[in-house]
Amino acid sequence: PEEEDVDFFGDDVPRTRDDGAASSSPSKLQRATRRQKMIATLARAEQSAPPPGCSKCEDNKKKNDEDKRKCFLEAEHLRRGVEKMLEACSAYMGSSARDQLVESLQLGVRYITPPEA
């Protein structure tokens, strides 16, 4: 079989003979054929299934997802607790003072989750 003289990207790579001298370059047709083979090989590689993930990575991803879920739940729990506290305080505060307190708490600001519609 003939030795390939293209690199990974299908570009020409100079060949050397056994005596160290450079050999003649392949014809344009040979280069085009080799380039087409390389493109076909890369296309097959892209279509193949992704390699299976390692078990440690999967375990870390599951733990990270669970921690993230718990963080969201805790933040929502605190948000609802503050809203209940404001409802209880509204009996003892004037409406303007309550509105000012609600505005200063900025309960509508969310950094992690989108606001509920």
Image (spheres, rainbow, N blue to C red):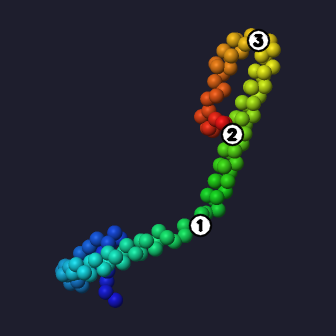
What kind of element bears circle 3? loop
Closer to the chain start, of discs 1 and 3, is: 1
Q: Are marks 3 and 2 in contact (CB under 8 Å)?
A: no
Q: Amino acid at mark 1?
A: Pro
Q: Amino acid at mark 3?
A: Met
Q: Are marks 1 and 3 in contact (CB under 8 Å)?
A: no
Closer to the chain start, of discs 3 and 2, is: 2
Q: Is residue 99 visible?
A: yes
Closer to the chain start, of discs 1 and 2, is: 1
Counting from the top left corner in percent of width and height, residue 83 is at 75, 26
Mark 1 burial class by Cα count in 10 Å: few <14, some 14-19, many 20+: few
Figure quadrant of the N terminus: bottom left
Return the residue at label 2.
72
Front residue of this view, candidates 4 and 10? 10
Residue 52, labelled with which disc?
A: 1
Return the residue at label 3.
93
Of badges 1 and 3, nearer the viewer stands 3
